[in-house]
Amino acid sequence: MQSIHHPLFAAVYELLSRWGGEWEKALRAEVVGAAWGRVLEVGAGTGLNFACYDPSRVEFVEAVEPDPAMLRYARRRREEAAVPVRLHQARVEELPFADESFDSAVATLVFCSVEEPARGFAELRRLLKPTGSLLLLEHVRAASPCMAQLQDLLTPLARRCAGNCHWNRPTLTTLAGAGLRIVSRREVGGGLLPLVAVRAIRE
Ligand SMILES: C[S@@+](CC[C@H](N)C(=O)[O-])C[C@H]1O[C@@H](n2cnc3c(N)ncnc32)[C@H](O)[C@@H]1O
């Protein structure tokens, strides 16, 4: 596996996030605010979700992020959290935790960039307790064939400029193939980057 280190992308992501819109904050609050108990967050990036964990529901968060450039910002952002957040440098495909350790797993805007998404979802399935939930916010492949074709065309550019981001991934199909079942799904917008907020459980 190639190492993940995108300092320019991390700096731009951090800068842009400071102007993050209210809709984005509300979406993060909706998805991340549903986490409870012992929480695993993967691809934590610059730590934008940390402030969204509800201290009346969450015991602690183990947050993993493979890119050292992202981790630098995430370390600072831990101070905004109202719950204990421990940071680890790791990829979702290979996580340093015991089976069935977590009540909730959180990933926002991550699986578009993961090198081996099927392996990543299998790891999350392994780490969730039988009663646990996976909470996802991801942009996915467009339903319209025309839009999906445009996504295919633009993906090489997006991968290059945005830390391996694939605009054209059928992420929810990959999730289902890893033995996870979607129990709620909300479409948030469409066009070139259709977003979905999902809760999934183990099959
Ligand atoms: C677009 S950023 C999103 C960051 C954050 N989750 C958010 O919502 O702002 C994508 C993140 O996924 C991380 N990532 C890429 N490949 C990964 C992998 N194999 N395992 C875990 N995280 C990965 C990147 O380093 C980056 O921080």
Image (cartoon, rainbow, N blue to C red):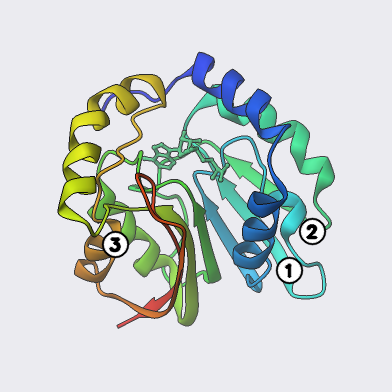
Classify mark 1 as within 8 Å of ligand 1 or not, answering yes or no.
no
Measure the C-alpha gap from mark 3 to mark 1: 24 Å
* Mark 2 lies on residue: 83
**Is there a contact, CB below 8 Å, between mark 2 and mark 1?**
yes
Q: Earlier along the polypeptide chain: callout 2 or callout 1?
A: 1
Residue beneath the point at 72% across and 69% down:
58
Relative to 45, 23 lies left or right: right
Residue beneath the point at 42% across and 50% down:
95
Quadrant in the rendering for residue 52: bottom right
* Amino acid marked by disc 3: Ala
- Asked which secondary structure carries label 2, the reply is loop
Q: Earlier along the polypeptide chain: callout 3 or callout 2?
A: 2
* Mark 1 lies on residue: 59
Query: Relative to 113, does residue 144 appear above or below in the rendering?
Result: below
Residue beneath the point at 45% across and 50% down:
96
Q: Earlier along the polypeptide chain: callout 3 or callout 1?
A: 1
Residue 57, given in percent of the width and then of the height, sits at 75, 75
Residue 198, given in percent of the width and then of the height, sits at 45, 69
* Mark 3 lies on residue: 122
Measure the C-alpha gap from mark 2 to mark 1: 7 Å
Residue 91, given in percent of the width and then of the height, sits at 41, 41
What quarter of the picture does the N terminus occupy? top left
Residue sitting nearer the eye, 170 or 190? 190
Measure the C-alpha gap from mark 3 to mark 2: 27 Å
